[in-house]
Amino acid sequence: MSNTIPYKIYLSEEEIPENYYNVRADMPIKPAPLLNPGTLQPLTAEEMEPIFCKELVQQELNNTDRLIHIPKAIRDFYKMYRPSPLVRAYCLEDRLGTPAHIYYKFEGNNTSGSHKLNSAIAQAYYAKQQGLKGVTTETGAGQWGTALSMACSYFGLDLKVFMVKVSYEQKIYRREVMRTYGASVTPSPSDTTEIGRKILEEFPGTNGSLGCAISEAVEVATKTEGYRYVLGSVLNQVLLHQSIIGQEVKTALDKYGVKPDLIIGCCGGGSNFGGLIAPFMGEKLRGEADYDFLGVEPASCPSFTRGKYVYDFCDTGEVTPLAKMYTLGNGFIPSPNHAGGLRYHGMSSILSELYDEGFMRVRTAEQSEVFEAAEEFARCEGILPAPESSHAIRAAIDEAVKCRETGQAKNIVFGLTGTGYFDMTAYQKFNDGEMTDEIPTDEDIAKGLATVPQFPGNEI
């Protein structure tokens, strides 16, 4: 094998993972279980099945099986756009004058434009296998709703999407892609559900949040015969499906004898970052190798860095189970900025536990510096990145500059979760000098945390 690393490292179809990797199997301390908010006892499969598909419930609760087989129908669908390329960012390296070697895993090579399709097709498949009529969901920036609309169309399932109001208004083209694939799309909070009407009454004129949209989607799923609710991030099952990202990265790097020193990903609910680091984190947990993991979240919605590690509702309407996670409080409503899908009030229980134990670190990035990095990347690498992905780009550039200053040659890998071609309103704001950095005050954070349920052992 030549020592020369090509610009793009492609795997063959045969190298698409045959199994999802379940990092929980290697975690010495497992993520805390979901709780029934009424009894405060761990949620059973029987209690979860009215909300989620049966097979997905089993995946959600599985803490022991390291590998979970990917059905042939899902793997065949993956072959339409996977394996995705791992790209050596030679042009970015030259521009920065850094001795660092920078690699990015590009997940935008599908119509949804993001990594979300990896889990969407799996969840739609299990819903179809169960004989369901359709599913409901929420979406923030629209990548998840777009991906799920594609997956549901493929399997002939109905889809009802509740889209965060500010994104519904800002990202009209993603909304129309969903409708093109047959989904119904409702701005959230809406007057079509009991919870939506309650939120609108309490917060008139609100721009919405993922927590609001989740509440409405769960309400409709539980009140409509033949429907279940599916989620695009946060849950254990979603990080499980996204592990194919990290597995492909590892296979590609292993081919060239490259060991990453630093792995970077943006953090909203955790699906992208969790999937990217999964196999590498497994090695770290088993004591086989060591890596530096860096998550990047928006300063406008700093769940990790300013939140608390407690049990909280996953939604604003408080109809979901309780999850132990780093949270800003289910009542936290982030500013209507362009952080897109990174506006969730909480974080994956898996990543929360790993962060709490010190296996990974997290930093924040402000909106304007994120778009500065996005444009610098676009001008030399030729891909217009999504705002979410650009949080990871910001950190990768900063770390590469540190390498230039110290003369240290690190192998840096980051996740490019998707493209920004539906985010031109945000780019226009930045180019026109109208973009602002809205960071929550301590009072805003305290107000959000006040909505966390209080019970013995869960005090803020």
Image (tube, rainbow, N blue to C red):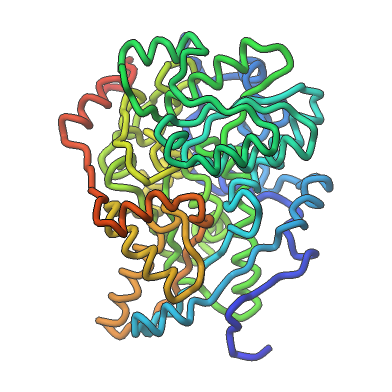
Q: Position of residue 125 (x, y in %)?
A: 76, 36
Q: Position of residue 352 (x, y in %)?
A: 41, 41
Most foreground residue, 138 or 309: 138
Quarter of the image for the N terminus: give it: bottom right
> Which quadrant of the view contains residue 204?
top left
Q: Position of residue 15 (x, y in %)?
A: 75, 65
Q: Is residue 179 above or below residue 243?
A: above
Most foreground residue, 437 or 34: 437
Residue at point 46%, 66% (across, down): 290
> Which quadrant of the view contains residue 185?
top right
Quarter of the image for the C terminus: give it: top left
Q: Position of residue 450 (x, y in %)?
A: 25, 21
Residue at point 50%, 60% (across, down): 415
Residue 29 appears anywhere in the view: no
Residue 217 appears anywhere in the view: yes
Using residue 373 as the reference point, say whether residue 76 is left or right of it.
Answer: right
Q: Is residue 277 above or below residue 439?
A: below
Using residue 218 as the reference point, say whether residue 198 is left or right of it.
Answer: left
> Which quadrant of the view contains residue 410?
bottom left
